[in-house]
Structures are given as C-alpha cells and as structure tokens.
Image: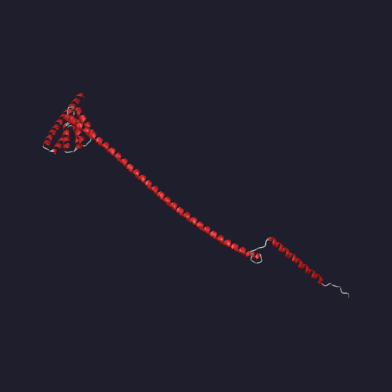
Amino acid sequence: MMVVSGLAQEDKEKMEAKNLKESLNYTWEGNEEVKSKDFVDAEMNYRKAIDKSGKNASAPYNLGNVYYNNNSYGEAFMRYKEAGTAAEDKPSKHKAFHNMGNVFMKNKEYQKAVDAYKEALRNDPSDEETRYNLALAKEMLKKQQDEQKNNDQDKDDQKQDQDKDKDQNKDQQDKDENQKDQQQDQKDQGEGDKDKQDQNEGDQDKDSDQSDDQKDNGKKDQQKDQQKKPQEEGGSKPRPNQLSPQQIKNILEAMNNEEKKVQEKVNAKKVKGQPVKTEKDW
C-alpha cells in the first residue's frame, strides 16, 4: 500500500510539474504578445496558463497588468489577488499587493490602498516606490476624511438651516392662523353685537309697542271711567268746584227736614178732609 501511495504521489508531482511548465510556456507567449501589443492573444495565453497550473503566480499577475492598462480595474484586482494567493515567495507577493494598492488608489478607496501597501512592504520593506505610494495613500485618505467631515458638517448645517426655516415657517403659519382666528373672533363678536343690537332694538320696539298698548289701554280705561262716572252721578259732568262731604251732608239733612215738613202738612190736610163714615139708620 505504501509503495502504491508513493507512486501515486510521485505521478501527481510529475503531473503538476508538467502542468506548471506548460503554464509557464503560455505565460512566456503572453508576455511576448504584450510586447507586440497583441492584448487579445496575450489574454488568451494568460488564461491558458492559469488553467494549467494554480502555482504559476506570474500568469494572473501579468493578466492583471493587461486589465489595469486597459482601465478594467475590477478584473485587474481579481487577478492581482489571485497572484498574491498563488505566490510562494515574498517578491511575488510584494508585487501583487503593490498593484492591488494601485487599483484601490484608482478607485479612490484610500483606506484599502493603505492596507495593501502595508502588506506589500511586509514582503519587501526596501521598496521605495511602495513606501512613496503608502505615504500618498495616507495623505489622500486624510484629505478624503476631512472632506467627508466637512461634507457631513455642511449637511448638518444645511439640515439645521432647513429645520430653522421649517420652524420659522411653522411659527409664521401659527401666527397667520392666530391672526385668522382673531379676525374670525372679531367678526363673530361683531355679528354677535349686531344680533344683540338687533335683539335690543326688537326688545325696544316690543317695549314701545307694549307701552303704546298700555297707553291705548290707559286711554280706553280712562274713557270707560269717564263714561261710567257721569252715569253714576246722573249723567251730569262734574263741576269744577265740588262741595265737601260735610256740606253735602248738611244739604241732604236740610232737604230731608224740608221734605218731612212738607209731608206733615200733607198728612194734616188729609186727615181734616177725610169724610167720616156713618151707619145707616134704617
């Protein structure tokens, strides 16, 4: 069993070596085509190289450079990342992370660029170009953060201004509403005063009518009294100078006395002139 496994491992390693060799050959062809600016054939050969062996870091790295030069930064980043994973030596890793940093700089992703350049420097601290790019990325990141901060502040200020304008508009609306309410109250009060005045005038007219009715009734009652009083007094109008009750009493007594005297005289005459009845003597 161990012998068979050893043979299988040996065959596997031979196959991998063969594939790596073919991959390197495709890579060389692609490099030549890049020199002649035949990017279509170069891309095709780099893809063949990548399919043949995953240990060939040069093929994806060089294909990433083709995409980068054609402004296909998304494709370029994928190939650089693939190259960094496949690389077994620090120089290859350094180049892959360096170029990933360049892609991030193109996309203005400065924080990611800083991280990529730092990883490149861990694999090759002596590369001054990477160090320069790292310093530039940090500067651009700070500028970006300041701009973002200013933009946020401007947005906050703008929002505060909008809120202030909104509050002012609301205050003005409330003021207008209050003014309308006051005008409506004044209008309602005026109408109420007018109604009250109309009611008072109506009451006054009613009182005036009642007063006129009372006056008319008073006149009627006075006329009735005037008609009734003469009837009680024998139909004669009252004289301006009326006698006192005592004078009337004295006159009545005198009249009674006179009437008695007259009656006595009449009675005396009746007695004297009355015939005396006699009985018949037969």
Q: Left or right: 6 with respect to 275?
A: left
Q: In this view, does 203 lie to the left or right of 116?
A: right
Q: Going 14% across and 33% down the picture, which residue do you hit?
A: 27
Between 159 and 282, the one lying in front of the other is 282
Which x, y percent locates residue 272? 81, 71
Nearer to us in this view, 120 or 236 = 236
**Residue reaching furthest front?**
241
Q: In this view, does 187 lie above or below 123?
A: below
Residue 54 seen in render:
no
Front in this rendered view, residue 137 or 3: 137
Q: Quadrant of residue 5?
A: top left
* Coloring applied to the structure: secondary structure
> Can residue 146 be seen at all in this image of the molecule?
yes
Indicate the position of residue 273 as horizontal and vertical percent values: 81, 72
- Up the image or down, 139 lies above or below 186; here it is above
State the residue lying farthest toward the top.
2
Q: Position of residue 135 (x, y in %)?
A: 20, 31
Q: Quadrant of the image for the N terminus? A: top left
Left or right of 247, for residue 131: left
Name the quadrant of the C terminus: bottom right
Snapshot quadrant of residue 80 = top left
Residue 175 spot, x, y in % from top left: 38, 46
At 20% across and 35% down in the image, what residue appears? 105
* Residue farthest right in this picture: 282
Q: How many labels does the image show?
A: 0
Front residue of this view, candidates 100 and 167: 167
Quarter of the view holding residue 97: top left
Residue 45 horizontal side relative to residue 269, left or right: left
